[in-house]
């Protein structure tokens, strides 16, 4: 059974930074792409970033490109999301996910419980 546990969320002022971590259980971590999505109340879960199993390829939503960086450490079964220059519009629950490589939720088959990120203006 795969488990994904996010951490690192919190309250930050606009312009600040946060680093999210997602620790994954299971022996197939290094063979799967990983991703981050986010969701606000009343809206669908939206794509943020994804990284290939090797870490050599990444993909970002235009809204976070140049501000967020996704990375992974396969030795630690952990994926990270470094978020800089945060904006109030980045406020959401952020979810870690494991599976395929792409922008849609259907590409992924395991999800974490989410971590709240709140950016104050």
Image (tube, rainbow, N blue to C red):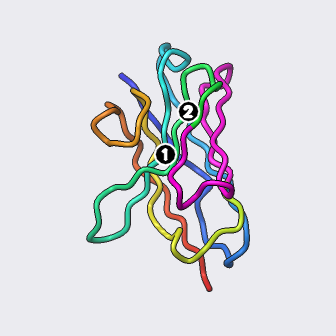
Estimate how packed mark 1 is, as few (under 14), some (14 to 19) or many (20 or more) residues with alpha carbons within 10 Å. many
| x and y, in percent, of residue 50 in the image | 51, 38
What percent of the width, then of the height, locates residue 30?
Answer: 56, 17
Query: How many numbered markers are drawn?
Result: 2
Q: Going 37% across and 39% down the picture, which residue do you hit? A: 111
Label 1: element kind: strand
The residue at 29%/66% (across/down) is 43
Q: Is 69 colored magenta in this rendering? A: yes
The image shows residue 66 at horizontal and vertical percentages of 68, 55
Per the image, label 2 sits on a secondary structure element best described as strand
**Above or below, comparing residue 7 to residue 53 in the picture:** below
Image quadrant holding the N terminus, namely top left
Which quadrant holds the C terminus?
A: bottom right
Which label's residue is closer to the chain start, 1 or 2? 1
Mark 1 → mark 2, Cα distance in angstroms:
9 Å
What label sits on residue 51 in the rendered view? 2
Q: Which residue is mark 1?
A: 36
Q: Is residue 99 above or below residue 85?
A: above
| Highlighted range, magenta | 59-82
Provide residue 69's location: percent of width, then percent of height: 67, 47
Q: Residue at x 49, y 51 (%)?
A: 48
């Amino acid at each position: 059974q795969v488990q994904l546990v996010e951490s690192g969320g919190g309250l930050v002022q606009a312009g600040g930074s946060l680093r999210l971590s997602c620790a994954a259980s299971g022996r197939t971590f290094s063979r799967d792409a990983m991703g981050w999505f986010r969701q606000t109340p009343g809206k669908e879960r939206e794509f943020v970033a994804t990284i290939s199993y090797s870490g050599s390829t990444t993909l970002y939503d235009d809204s976070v490109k140049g501000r967020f960086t996704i990375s992974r450490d396969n030795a630690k079964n952990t994926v990270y999301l470094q978020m800089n220059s945060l904006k109030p519009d980045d406020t959401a629950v952020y979810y870690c996910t494991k599976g395929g490589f792409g922008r849609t939720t259907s590409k992924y088959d395991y999800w974490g419980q989410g971590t709240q990120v709140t950016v104050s203006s």
